Image: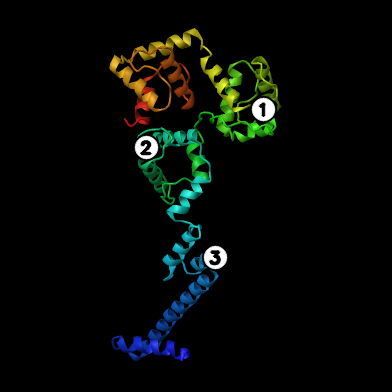
Amino acid sequence: MRSLTLPLLIAAHIGLAAPAPAQDIGDIVEGLAQGLIQQELDRNAYIAAQNANTAAAYRDYLAKFPRGQFRTNAQNALARLGAPVEGTPASDAQAEQRLGITSAQRVAVQRELTRLGYNTFGADGAWGRNTRTAIATWQRDRGERATGYVTEAQLRALTRNVVVTPPTDTPPATNLTAAQTESALKLTRAQRTEIQKQLIALGYDAGVADGLWGSRTRVAIKAWQKANRREQTGYITSAQVKLLASQATTTAPPADSEDAAALEESLLGLTLAERADLQRRLTRLGYAITRTDGNFGALTRRAIADWQADTGEPVTGYLTADQVRLIRVETGG
């Protein structure tokens, strides 16, 4: 009986179709036969995937029949098995999550997107709807899939020219060597370059600041550790990254340079209300300021200097007109 199914279906389709010239009948029959055969193959492939009931089987079905009549069923089955099909929002989100993006990198991505004209309405490291929309628009303009979730290559593109802040402390593992402890920090090349610059600024010869730590950088780290009464390993810890950044930031610039920066800020004519607003915005960006009263004291100057260091600006502790605009852009205008 099963062998009669295909001819009967073809006959039924021909019977329902409008009359056609004799020379077209063969083409109609061939087209109907091919379509029905494809449907039968599609159905059989999905039944085989159901019988196997594995992620590999369902993926194999979707690879063979990407627009098959059971495509949605196969995707739902993959989701139930905990293996979302590639290209769906769930898999895009999981792929991004596997990158282990740090909070500092998230802030850096938001700043870079805003700089490129894709406003995230804040650079706080929290990727909400505004940031996801900015990412998706940026991806679309690059001719890539607009998912709103970054890939590893896209993350590198967005943080390539951005120096991010050091990672937060993690509980020390007593069984790790000094090299393993440093490796666990997962310092980016930009961060390594910044650390070399900080060592050089403090008078330690770290060689060329290129992010590649050879013997000269290791010797410089050892010398700095010795001067700060730390274990001389040549490998840096999370606490030492922060200490080094603090020392480099507080290193006083030449008097004429500081005077010039102070003069440039004074020429902006910022009102007390504008200064208080800038203090609040810096606080929102994560830079600690005790009081937002419009008076730029030591804590505010330190916060400005930290922000300048994180954004790759000259570290002076005094603001320029462009920096005032950038702070406002980063905090939503």
Instruction: Please say if 55 is above or below 123.
Output: below
Q: Residue at x 39, y 46 (%)?
A: 136
Percent coordinates x, y for residue 315 in the rendering: 48, 19
Q: Please give the residue where the numbered disc 3 appears in the rendered image.
A: 54
**Mark 2 or 3, closer to the camera:** 3
Q: Please give the residue where the numbered disc 1 appears in the rendered image.
A: 235
Residue most extreme to the top: 255
Q: Please give the residue where the numbered disc 2 appears in the rendered image.
A: 120
Q: Residue at x 35, y 35 (%)?
A: 121
Q: Is residue 201 left or right of residue 327?
A: right
Q: Nearer the viewer, residue 191 or 293?
A: 293
Percent coordinates x, y for residue 229 in the rendering: 66, 16
SS for dot 3: loop
User: Three-letter amino acid code at disc 2?
Assistant: Thr
Q: Is residue 191 left or right of residue 289?
A: right
Local packing at callout 1 (Cα closer than 10 Å; few below 14, some 14-19, many 20+) is many
Task: Name the image quarter holding the C terminus.
Answer: top left
User: Three-letter amino acid code at disc 1?
Assistant: Tyr
Question: Spatial distance from mark 2 to mark 3, Cα to Cα?
Answer: 40 Å
Percent coordinates x, y for residue 112 in the rendering: 43, 35
Residue 29 in view in this figure:
yes
Q: Earlier in the sequence, mark 1 or mark 3?
A: 3
Q: Residue at x 60, y 26 (%)?
A: 209
Q: Is residue 251 left or right of residue 131?
A: right
SS for dot 1: loop
User: Three-letter amino acid code at disc 3?
Assistant: Thr
